[in-house]
Amino acid sequence: MVAIAKRLVPAHKISLLQREHFKATHDPVTGLLNQIALDEHIEQQLMVSARYDKSFALLMVELDPYQEFVGINSKITTNAVLLDFAKRIKCCVRRTDTVARVESNVFSILLPDIQNFRNVVKVVENINHQLLDPFLVKDAQYVVNAVIGIEVFPNKEKTHKSFSENAFIAMCRAKNITGRNYVFYDDDLDQSVCRRISLENSIREAIEQQEYDIHYLPVNSIRGNELSYVQADVAWHSGQLRDMDPDTINEYIETMELSKLFGDIQLSMICQKLTHWEHDIEFGNKPVLLALGDSRLNDQQTPSRYKKIVTAAGVAPERIGLVIKESQILQDIEFAQHQIRAFKQEGFKVIIDRFCCGLAYLGKFSPGMVDMIRLDGEIVSRLDERIEWLCVVEGLIRIARQLNIQTIVDGIDNDFQYQTLLNVSADYWQGDYVFILSNGMETPVAGNKSTR
């Protein structure tokens, strides 16, 4: 149909139609889409998101205080600021996002396919960062702030009109909020996001102020019950973080894009401890197990970077065991296989954590790629309810032994579990049944529930 249209309509008329369509759908000052075009995009996004069960967000951004600014400046200066602001907003979003100017001083941003609300707040933070630099017009500097209202799909009403209205209402609320310049239309969501941001700030501050220690949990041999490995875990000193589940904190660190930096810090601290242990009879040659977060596993530079860190500290790479969750491997088995091979080539040990359904991928790994597997503690805890779960434990251990992989049974919390697992052929065990070795202390101290 397009080819036929081009033959029937003269070229100069097509160009004229295109110009007219651009005028009808775009803002003349900034060149961004206008309200009409934005409504069409929202309507399309509502249908796509409803069909594929995906979330999206609409941000309404108002320059504030705008009227005072217009009153003391010419139209040319005002338009120059608007054009500059439009360019800055475009720098804050993805190519797939939609930016529009819907009123004289109001812009809208449509964010399709948002993975979590942190992605939305990140855009807000980027806009605020862009506003830190003054606007330069004719050798004069102007500082302009903004307030932002946010509406997120899905919600009860599903029309582009209600969507824009809700974002506008949230934007108006933002004018009365002190301490931040954005508000989510949904009160519960707004409070949830505020709590999340507060927690993220606490984590960032705790890392900057070094309000944490590395604690070392024993991993003992089944036969002889001798210390064989130690697992490194972070213990937070901050009041808000001290009682939180460590896995939850780690998830926040991942979303904050601090995982790589904090992982390098942990590895450096572990290397210092290993150097300190060199002449210790009990700990001298014991490897340390360190959990590997998603961003570190997915970064192809991590194997070589980790090698440089341990080499600079004078520590042999085989003294470090990198712990990878089974769920991380299942996300992309081929890439995980590539990364594990790279870690092994650099000399590190590799441990698969929370092992449960390894038949899905272990057969694809070359011999020697995986040193150990650690059985999910949830499986071991079921022994207290039904002894039949011992068959599951034995089956998983048998799989590992056939592949010449050692096993750690995690979550041994009482004497019954320990005595029961003495009858299986696992290599190592750990859990609350033993003591936690505290960083900086020469004698064992009783520990809280271990992290896995």
Image (tube, rainbow, N blue to C red):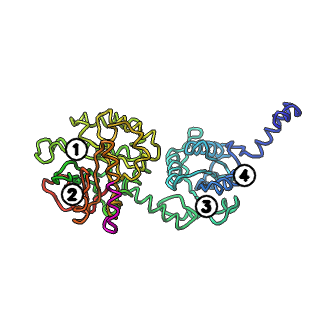
Return the residue at label 3: 154
How far apart marks 1 and 2 lie (CA) works out to 16 Å
Residue numbers of the magenta segment: 383-394
Residue closer to the observer: 229 or 209: 229
Q: Say left or right for 238 vs 167.
A: left
The local secondary structure at tag 1 comes to loop
Which label's residue is closer to the chain start, 1 or 2? 1
Return the residue at label 1: 287
Q: How many marks are shown on the rendered structure? A: 4
Return the residue at label 2: 436
The local secondary structure at tag 3 comes to loop
Q: Amino acid at mark 2?
A: Ile
Q: Amino acid at mark 4?
A: Glu
- Of the 4 image quadrants, the one containing the C terminus is bottom left
State the image coordinates of residue 278 (x, y, percent, origin top left). 14, 41
Q: Amino acid at mark 1?
A: Pro
Quadrant housing residue 1: top right
How far apart marks 4 and 3 lie (CA) works out to 18 Å
State the image coordinates of residue 32 (x, y, percent, origin top left). 67, 44
CB atoms at circles 2 and 3 under 8 Å apart? Answer: no
Return the residue at label 4: 40
The verdict on residue 87 being magenta is no
Please identify, in this view, whether the residue under mark 2 or under mark 4 is nearer the observer.
Answer: 2
